[in-house]
Image (tube, helix red, strand yellow):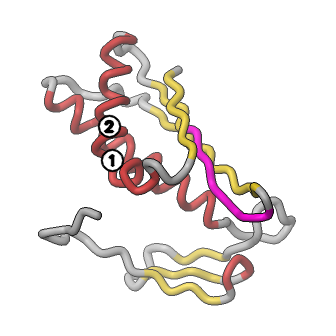
């Protein structure tokens, strides 16, 4: 396990009520109602929040990979993240797909940016070897 030498930021939230509750950040920038996936209740769910965080982080990691090559990501760069909640043998698991669009970037270069981002993105590191992840380059 890698230990952090220097903490750059700590996200702090308080959640009550689990999947039928509320979650709020200490700075009140995040204030969401939670609901179970697929329910008709108002609110988001942990899988959607995880997908949003991972896709944003992944774009940042691709931006760093592009900057090392002295190029910029297209403003139309998109990562559509899909996080599945499922079961195997009665136990709950996640799996994910990152559908990545880098319009105007040469396909080989796009593949290199995606592969490098997957090595450096903290979310990708956290999931590596723990859940099935597919990277799909559009």
Q: What element carries label 2?
A: helix
Residue behind mark 2:
117
| Residue 105 placement (x, y as % from top left) | 35, 15
Instruction: Find out whether residue 53 is within the magenta segment.
Output: no
| Residue 134 placement (x, y as % from top left) | 55, 35
| Residue 32 placement (x, y as % from top left) | 60, 75
Q: Residue 5 carries which label?
A: none
Q: Quadrant of residue 19?
A: bottom right
| Residue 104 placement (x, y as % from top left) | 38, 14
For the image, the number of numbered tags is: 2
The residue sitting at 35% across, 10% down in the picture is 106
Q: Residues within 10 Å of mark 2 (few under 14, many from 20)?
A: many
Q: Distance between the residues labelled 1 and 2?
A: 6 Å
Q: Which residues are the magenta region?
A: 90-97
Q: Which mark is residue 121?
A: 1
The residue sitting at 46% across, 46% down in the picture is 55
**Of the pair 115 and 100, the residue shown nearer to us:** 115
- What predominant SS class does the magenta segment belong to? strand
């Amino acid at each position: 396990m890698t230990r952090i030498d220097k903490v750059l930021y700590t996200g702090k939230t308080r959640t009550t009520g689990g999947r039928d509750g509320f979650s709020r950040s200490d700075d009140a920038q995040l204030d969401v109602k939670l609901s179970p996936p697929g329910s008709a209740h108002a609110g988001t769910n942990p899988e959607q929040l995880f997908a949003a965080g991972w896709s944003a982080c992944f774009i940042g990691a691709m931006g760093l990979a592009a900057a090392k090559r002295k190029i910029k990501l297209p403003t139309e760069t998109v990562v559509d993240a899909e996080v599945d909640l499922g079961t195997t043998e009665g136990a709950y698991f996640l799996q994910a797909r990152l559908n990545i669009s880098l319009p105007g970037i040469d396909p080989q270069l796009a593949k290199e940016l995606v592969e490098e981002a997957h090595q450096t993105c903290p979310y990708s590191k956290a999931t590596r070897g723990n859940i099935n992840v597919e990277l799909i380059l559009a």
